[in-house]
Amino acid sequence: MELLISSAITEAWFHKLHKHLDSDVIIVGAGPSGLLCAAELAARNVSTTLFESKLAPGGGMWGGAMLFNSIVIQAETIHLLDKYGIRYQSQGNDLFTADATEATSALIYHAAHNGAAIFTGICMEDVLVRNDSVCGVVANWNPVKRLDMHVDPLSFSSRIVLDATGHPSEVVKVLTLKNDVRLRLPDGVMKSERSMNAEAGEKACVEYTGEVFPGLYVSGMAACGVSGSNRMGPIFGGMLLSGYKAAGLIARALGKDYA
Ligand code: 48H
């Protein structure tokens, strides 16, 4: 019995890995913006691979604010909560709250159920660049990185890569550190995130969601960070709208229908 269990797990996992060595889209980071984008793309039959360095997907949404695990969403995002079956309560002033656990687990479930391949414990450490375009990522086990083991990574190719790594903007950072590139951002360079301003940050994170280099898109806090915009604190509407916008832009770039 034990060997049958081992065989079933390795068979299923390596089948998933092999199928996703090449995808339409690689999303790095399974926070709210990456998960929502994955759920939307996978629902449109876009082959989508999601790499998350931690054991559990969900990023910064589990913890709400200061571990008070409720999240705040504004009125214009309610249609996405309805779409993904997340319940909410009005708190007045066009603000709503949702249970962080329900919201995060719903996004994870829909991304996986719609067909995105989610790989956890795997960390993007470099990008593939050909003909002045990002065309994949280089990844390794997070524990291997953390223990500083000298183990070479594997490469994964895609038409498009999305940096959804949140505050550190890891994909854009590695692209600009290792290559002499100009980004499609004001001044052509990556900026640093600014101090808290909820209104400005929420607006900027959606506005700057898009392609920053051929083949490389940004969403969520990464879009805020690279554009030098403000952080917004524990309000998550902008993250969801950013993931939704990224999915629309990416689907269109791939020539897929997007209603
Ligand atoms: C694989 C990686 C790597 C890597 C990081 O931070 P996130 O939740 O991302 P967003 O942008 O969808 O949401 C941001 C939100 O959670 C937040 O922090 C807000 C609203 N802050 C406001 C404020 O003022 O502080 O998730 C990013 C995910 C995480 O799960 C990381 O573990 C993962 O990306 N990640 N995965 N390879 N190199 N780097």
Image (tube, grey):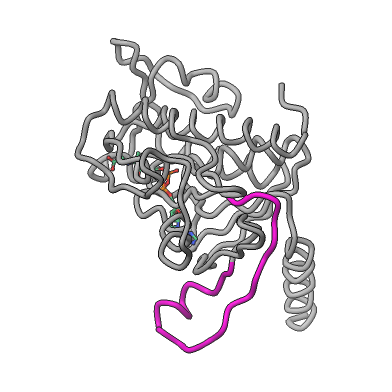
State the residue lying farthest toward the left: 195
Q: Is residue 119 above or below residue 190?
A: below
Measured as percent of width and height from the top left, residue 62 is found at 39, 45
Residue that appears at 52% across and 25% down: 81
Vertical arrangement, residue 48 with respect to residue 250, above or below = below
Looking at the image, how many numbered discs can be counted on the residues? 0
Residue plotted at (72% across, 68% down): 13
Left or right, 191 with reference to 243: left
Please give the name of the residue rendered at 29% of the width and 10% of the height, measured from the top-left corner: 93
Judged from this view, the residue extending furthest toward the bottom is 150
| Residue in front for this viewpoint, 177 or 125 | 177
| Quarter occupied by the C terminus | top right
**Which quarter of the image is occupied by the N terminus?**
bottom right
On the picture, is 216 further left or further right than 145? right
Q: What stretch of residues is rendered in magenta?
A: 138-161
Measured as percent of width and height from the top left, residue 164 is found at: 48, 48
Q: Quadrant of residue 67?
A: top left
Query: Within the magenta stretch, is there residue 165?
Result: no
| Residue 80 placement (x, y as % from top left) | 54, 24
Q: Nearer the viewer, residue 9 or 38?
A: 38
Residue 160: in magenta span: yes
